[in-house]
């Protein structure tokens, strides 16, 4: 897996937009998903994995009860993939992982936690077009018929209506990227989409490591975080925009007015 450590803002921009040029159309159109993490040692583990215990066996129970108690008007269609996207979006532990099309949104999540400004951060960059070339024929064919690079929940539902059918497609772990419905402004403003693995126990950095041409890691040194954070704020990439509502506004104001010394180990009251 390719890894680059940047030392300044300009190098960071070059690294984020590397390979974005598409000569076929003469435009800068990246085919990459971005995920920012505030500490370099954080792994690409799903929230389901982070539950611990026998989490794989709990997945069905979690989703079944979410569907039972949530109001059905919350989903466009009563399909597993609609429910799974909704549940993940609202915090239910799931095998889905958040990504964004926007490198700046990924940078936000890499620098939003000022209490981790004493450690290096990382932005993962994964080429979803190349990842989809590894999919079984039924899923690749569905993408090709649509002329799309990323799945929708409707497209996945047509091929694999259940997680069991998804897992049975291949003896190997497979990973695909899909866009959720525009559930709310948070999904839209974060330019968000998900990855999902056929194996609920799979840690995505291990899968990407076994396909080194699919991804790269951009290492952001701790000493560069404040400059990135301040420039993102000036560009309006903030909690106020990415988490519309009073909660996001409060999170933005708390961070914006926190003293710089807070990142050096100060504890919350």
Image (spheres, rainbow, N blue to C red):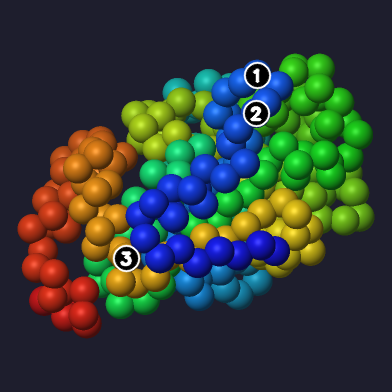
Q: Position of residue 247 (x, y in %)?
A: 20, 46
| Foreground pick, 62 / 98 | 98
Mark 1–mark 3 Cα distance, whole angstroms, equals 35 Å
The vertical placement of 268 against 111, above or below, is below
Q: Which residue is mark 3?
A: 224
For mark 3, give the secondary structure. helix
Q: Which residue is mark 1?
A: 25
Residue at the spot 79% in from the left edge and 50% down from the top edge: 174
Q: Which residue is mark 2?
A: 22
- 137 sits left or right of 91 in the view: right
CB contact under 8 Å: marks 2 and 1: yes
Q: Earlier in the sequence, mark 3 or mark 2?
A: 2
| Foreground pick, 229 / 238 | 229
| Foreground pick, 173 / 70 | 173
For mark 2, give the secondary structure. strand
Q: Residues within 10 Å of mark 1 (few under 14, many from 20)?
A: few
The vertical placement of 163 against 161, above or below, is below
For mark 1, give the secondary structure. loop
Residue at the spot 62% in from the left edge and 57% down from the top edge: 216
Q: Residues within 10 Å of mark 3 (few under 14, many from 20)?
A: some
Q: How many marks?
A: 3
Q: Position of residue 95 (x, y in %)?
A: 62, 53
Q: Residues within 10 Å of mark 2 (few under 14, many from 20)?
A: few
């Amino acid at each position: 897996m390719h890894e680059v450590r940047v030392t300044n803002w300009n190098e960071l921009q070059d690294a984020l937009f590397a390979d974005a040029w598409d000569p076929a159309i003469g435009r800068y159109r990246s085919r990459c998903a971005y995920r920012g993490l505030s500490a370099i040692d954080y792994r690409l583990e799903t929230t389901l994995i982070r539950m611990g215990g026998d989490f794989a066996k709990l997945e069905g129970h979690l989703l079944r009860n979410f569907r039972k108690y949530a109001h059905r008007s919350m989903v466009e269609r009563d399909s597993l993939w609609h429910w799974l996207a909704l549940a993940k979006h609202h915090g239910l532990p799931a095998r889905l992982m958040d990504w964004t099309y926007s490198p700046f949104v990924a940078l936000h999540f890499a620098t939003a936690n000022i209490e981790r400004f004493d450690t290096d951060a990382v932005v993962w960059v994964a080429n979803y077009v190349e990842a989809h070339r590894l999919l079984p024929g039924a899923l690749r064919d569905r993408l090709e018929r649509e002329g799309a690079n990323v799945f929708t929940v409707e497209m996945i539902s047509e091929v694999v209506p259940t997680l069991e059918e998804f897992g049975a497609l291949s003896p190997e772990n497979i990973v695909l990227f899909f866009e959720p419905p525009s559930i709310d402004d948070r999904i839209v403003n974060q330019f968000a989409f998900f990855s999902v693995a056929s194996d609920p126990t799979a840690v995505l950095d291990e899968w990407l490591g076994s396909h080194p041409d699919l991804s790269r890691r951009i290492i952001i040194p701790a000493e560069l975080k404040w400059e990135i954070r301040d420039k993102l704020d000036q560009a309006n990439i903030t909690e106020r925009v990415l988490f519309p509502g009073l909660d996001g506004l409060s999170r933005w104001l708390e961070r914006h007015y926190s003293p710089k010394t807070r990142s050096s180990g100060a504890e919350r009251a």
